[in-house]
Amino acid sequence: MKIFPKPLKKGDKIAIISPAGSVEPTQLEKGIEMIKSKGYEPVLGDNLYTKFSNGYNYAGTEEQRLKDMNWALNDPEISAIWASRGGYGCQHLIESLNLKEFTKNPKWYIGYSDNTVIQSYLLKKGFASIHGQTIKTSSFGVTEESYDLLFDILKGKKPKYGLKSNQFNKQGNIEGELVGGNLALIYALLGTRYSCDFKDKILFIEDIGENFYALDRMIMSLELAGVFKKISGLIIGGMTNMGDEKENKQYEESFDEFAYKLISDRISKYKFPTVFGFPNGHIKDNQPLIIGGEVSLKIDKTVSVNFK
């Protein structure tokens, strides 16, 4: 059982930082106002809008991004940390993260995409986090429900989800700890000391913008690393903008059927219960999951995914 931060109260401070890609102030305005409207105080990291180009448009140098991250983790006045966006860059930081004060005052870390790296690090240290919308995503038409559910978690509620069946699902009932996040980052961390402990866990994966062969390569890497022999269940979320935009008629769809078939074929020899089509990932209806949370899966003609 992982350590859950204490619920937030009205007036609590939420740090907003950019641990990876750069952002424009206009991209965060709506999200910052939303935090205020919910009764919390957003506190902006010093380098939230900093820009540093080095083969990628980072939100500052590694030192600048690390400074904001360690401030947010350890400042006793901060009650939660919300990533402005993902992109690339979190791997630069994990060797130098400081949890000295964080362990005395654990707080929710919120994000997805590249933030899977930070969440995997926290998970190894025993702390749960929220795989959900970033602040930037509020600027381009995501569902209000995806944010409302996230604020419910901050207030101490455990999410419960009901889904329709999917043709690729594997029936069964299982309970266990949820691990995972963005597939590309799970793949990038394989073989490092920051990779998940997969044994008897329920794995969640999602991704965006991969060629189908690259998706297959990542799934094959999990296979060759023995991940599918270790896990007790699997949840697959959004698979969108996959393959060639000109050739793939489902390119804009949240749940690409060919990507799902590819994954389904690769795991066909395994018996663990599997859910396809969970609404989390690089999609507009990105409903939050608790990485490190205990979850109950019931997969039959309908599907329930309930955190305990």
Image (spheres, rainbow, N blue to C red):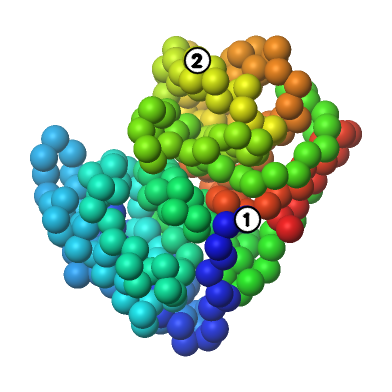
Is 169 or 125 nearer to us in this picture?
125
Q: Amino acid at mark 2?
A: Leu
Q: Considering only vertical position in the picture, is 47 above or below 133?
A: below
Crowd around label 2: few <14 · some 14–19 · many ≥20 (10 Å): few
Can residue 42 be seen in this snapshot?
Answer: no
Residue at 28% across, 56% down: 97
Residue 252 has which mark?
A: none
Callout 1 touching callout 2 (CB < 8 Å): no
Can residue 247 be seen in this snapshot?
Answer: yes
Is 196 or 84 nearer to us in this picture?
196
- Quadrant in the picture for the N terminus: bottom right
Disc 1 or 2, which lies upstream in sequence?
1
Crowd around label 1: few <14 · some 14–19 · many ≥20 (10 Å): few
Residue occupied by mark 2: 224
Residue at 64% across, 46% down: 177
- Quadrant in the picture for the C terminus: bottom right
Is 118 or 34 nearer to us in this picture?
118
SS state under label 2: helix
Q: Considering only vertical position in the picture, is 1 above or below 176?
A: below
Q: Position of residue 73 (x, y in %)?
A: 34, 67
Q: Nearer the viewer, mark 1 or mark 2?
A: 1
Residue occupied by mark 1: 1
Residue at 44% across, 61% down: 109
Among the 4 quarters of the image, the one containing residue 250: top right
Q: Position of residue 163 (x, y in %)?
A: 77, 43
Q: Position of residue 157 (x, y in %)?
A: 68, 68
Among the 4 quarters of the image, the one containing residue 198: top right
SS state under label 1: loop
Q: Is residue 166 left or right of residue 115?
A: right
Q: Position of residue 264 (x, y in %)?
A: 66, 18
